[in-house]
Image (cartoon, helix red, strand yellow):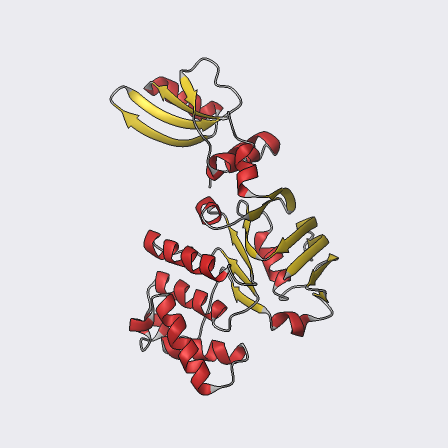
Amino acid sequence: MKITIDQLSKIYPNGNRALSDVQLEIENGMFGLLGPNGAGKSSLMRILVTLMKPSKGKVTVNGFDLVKNRKDIRKMLGYLPQDFRFFSKLKTYEFLDYAARLAGMKDTKERASAVDKMLEEVGLFEARDRQANRLSGGMKRRLGIAQALINSPQIIIVDEPTTGLDPEERIRFRNLLSTISTNDVIIILSTHIVGDISSTCTNMALLNRGEVAYSGSPDELVEKANGKVWLIKATESEYMEINEKYPVISNVPTSEGWEIQVVADEINGYYGENIDPNLEHAYVYFMESRLNQWTAI
């Protein structure tokens, strides 16, 4: 499987440019799409799942043109939107059965077996007879994940998938996607949560203001922050100064003041030492140093 995005732009009727000349190639495995809110991630997702047409550019999926071959591409897709809705009068298993029928599963026995298996995988089997509108927020999100995966699609697109999930549910979801990604499948994970990408994705892109600011592996992005992450031991007054000067990643109170992690080329006038960067550090450093566009994650 391969998705080729060529000079893709989206301009809304009000003049807002959501995407500008996006150029990407996405192949089998987990692909992370990272960026702050308003970066254009959801607009790109909606185009890829054929819910919205681009203003300019072209997308091909295994040789199929996204605009000309919409029906063929939709058969390949599983999609979990950020704002997931469902019919509230249906029970959990009834909704998933309905989603399976929409996905083209016509055999009743095969569909029933697939529904039960998927409910087990997302931890909802015990709630299969519960009204869907009575599920907790996290359980509703898991039901959304289940409907995206029910027909073993070749392309799975999930927009902010771990919103509303507790840490245990988030890990379960990541593990589920990682297992699926070993097949001949493309999984696109759009998120502003860095941990979702660092734990699962082998390739990624960073969107900022509708443009691709970075494309490559998470490790290569982390490498750009080597020597740029500092652990500073600071007094109370120094903490206030540092918070004004540098992007602060974390701060921990100590008996003598604070231990603060910041990203910066240099920390003039403060006592600190370099520490190994992770993807969160690299994201903040890249947004600050290359784009001058840092916002808290």
Q: Nearer the viewer, residue 202 or 77?
A: 202
Residue 172: percent from left, percent from top? 37, 58
Work out whether 238 lies above or below 70: above
Q: Quadrant of the N terminus?
A: bottom right
Say how many tags the image has.
0
Work out whether 249 lies above or below 80: above
Which residue occupies 43% across, 27% down? 275
Instruction: Tell whether 166 sits left or right of 79.
Output: left
Work out whether 98 lies above or below 279: below
Place residue 134 in its image quadrant: bottom left
Q: Nearer the viewer, residue 215 or 55?
A: 215
Instruction: Tell whether 175 sits left or right of 33.
Output: left
Which residue occupies 29% across, 72% down? 126
Q: Nearer the viewer, residue 246 or 96?
A: 96
Place residue 153 in its image quadrant: bottom right
Does residue 95 appear in the picture of this structure?
no
Q: Nearer the viewer, residue 66 or 131?
A: 66
Farthest top residue? 269
Does residue 51 appear in the picture of this structure?
yes
Residue 273: percent from left, percent from top? 42, 20
Farthest bottom residue? 108
Which residue occupies 45% across, 86% down? 108
Which residue occupies 38% across, 26% down? 260
Work out whether 185 lies above or below 252: below
Residue 38: percent from left, percent from top? 56, 48
Residue 86: percent from left, percent from top? 45, 72
Place residue 269 in its image quadrant: top left
